[in-house]
Amino acid sequence: MSIVVENLTKKYGEQKAVNDISFEIKTGEVVGFLGPNGAGKSTTMKIITCFMAPTSGDVRLDNESIHTHPEEIKKKIGYLPENNPLYLDMPIVEYLRFTAEVQGVPKNLIPGRISDMIDRCGLDREKHKNINELSKGYRQRVGLAQAMIHDPEVLVLDEPTTGLDPNQIVEIRKLIKDLGKEKTVILSSHILSEVEATCDRILIINRGRIVADGTSDTLRSQAQGQELLKINIEAAPDAVEAAVRGLATVEKISAVDGKEGWFNVQSKPDSSSRKEIFDLCVKNKWYLMEMTGLETRLEDVFQKLTK
């Protein structure tokens, strides 16, 4: 199911949380939605899911508008909001049965859907517990299960791996990638490596506007232009850092955590610092053990677009 967002705006008083944004998500795409806190991510997601009305603009799911067919659209969307909406006093199985009934799943199909969600979301060991007995990570799994219980065509997941340990994050990533083969998925996260590993495409929003749209490779290539080097110099680290920072071609230098003598160096636009660093080492009789170019990181792209 495709999603088309057209000139979407949401105002709170005079402030525009979302400011005239437009984009399209094709059927079967897993799209990462990134942005700093307050950028408009959650507001956009709430509008897409008909949880909130826009001030102006439209969202269409397969040509059905949120203004004219909100109830039909809700049936086709599974939504996990940032604040997981669980009834903590309910047992897991009863909660999933309740959400299935609310979503209109036929009664004869409910036991099978519950069993499928418990299996796919890794809840088998905990399924006999009340939700209030679960860790935060397992509560998040229950939230994912309720979002998928009615087998929606679109999944909107706002920070789906919050509270999960590293092993659980890997499992949920795999689940989301598998779901992307049959559903359209919008995924919001602050963990950029997670988005890069999971999503086919990335949208970055800042101050209510879309500032980037493309694959992680596309965004990195567009941000190229400032040389990034990783260097290892055998000399007093403080002296090396001060001397390299003073080079005319260097914009920024930072020590690599936990690795003495290693630094990341960013050159100024349209400049290269390789020769200057080499000459500096010769002049000071320092041993240059390594100097390699680094690919622009997604974190660097994000910071450049949203700072």
Image (cartoon, rainbow, N blue to C red):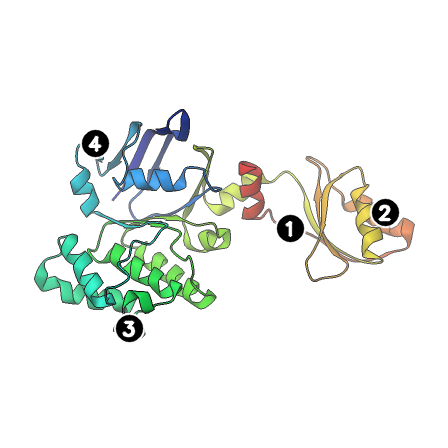
Q: Is residue 121 in view from this perspective?
A: no
Say whether disc 3 or disc 2 marks the residue closer to the N-terminus.
3
Question: Judging from the image, what secondary structure is the residue with disc 4 in?
Answer: loop
Residue 159 vs 43, above or below: the answer is below
Classify 10 Å Cα crowding around label 3: few (below 14), some (14-19), many (20 and above): few
Q: Amino acid at mark 1?
A: Leu
Question: Judging from the image, what secondary structure is the residue with disc 3 in?
Answer: helix
Say whether disc 1 or disc 4 marks the residue closer to the N-terminus.
4
Which tag is nearer the camera, tag 1 or tag 4?
4
Q: Is residue 230 in view from this perspective?
A: yes
34 sits left or right of 96 in the view: right
Residue 3 vs 141, above or below: the answer is above
**Residue designated by label 2:** 279
Q: Amino acid at mark 4?
A: His
| x and y, in percent, of residue 241 in the image | 79, 50
| x and y, in percent, of residue 182 in the image | 27, 54
Specify the farthest residue to the front.
89
Q: Residue at x 37, y 29 (%)?
A: 12
Q: Residue at x 69, y 35 (%)?
A: 270
Residue 138 vs 280, above or below: the answer is below
**Residue designated by label 4:** 67
The answer to whether the residue labelled 1 contacts the one labelled 2, judged by CB atoms less than 8 Å apart, is no
**Residue designated by label 3:** 124
- Distance between the alpha carbons at the discs numbered 3 and 2: 62 Å
Classify 10 Å Cα crowding around label 2: few (below 14), some (14-19), many (20 and above): few
Question: Judging from the image, what secondary structure is the residue with disc 1 in?
Answer: loop
Residue 149 occupies quadrant: bottom left
Which is nearer the eye, 15 or 242? 15
Say whether disc 1 or disc 2 marks the residue closer to the N-terminus.
2
Which tag is nearer the camera, tag 1 or tag 3?
3
**Residue designated by label 1:** 294
- Distance between the alpha carbons at the discs numbered 1 and 3: 43 Å
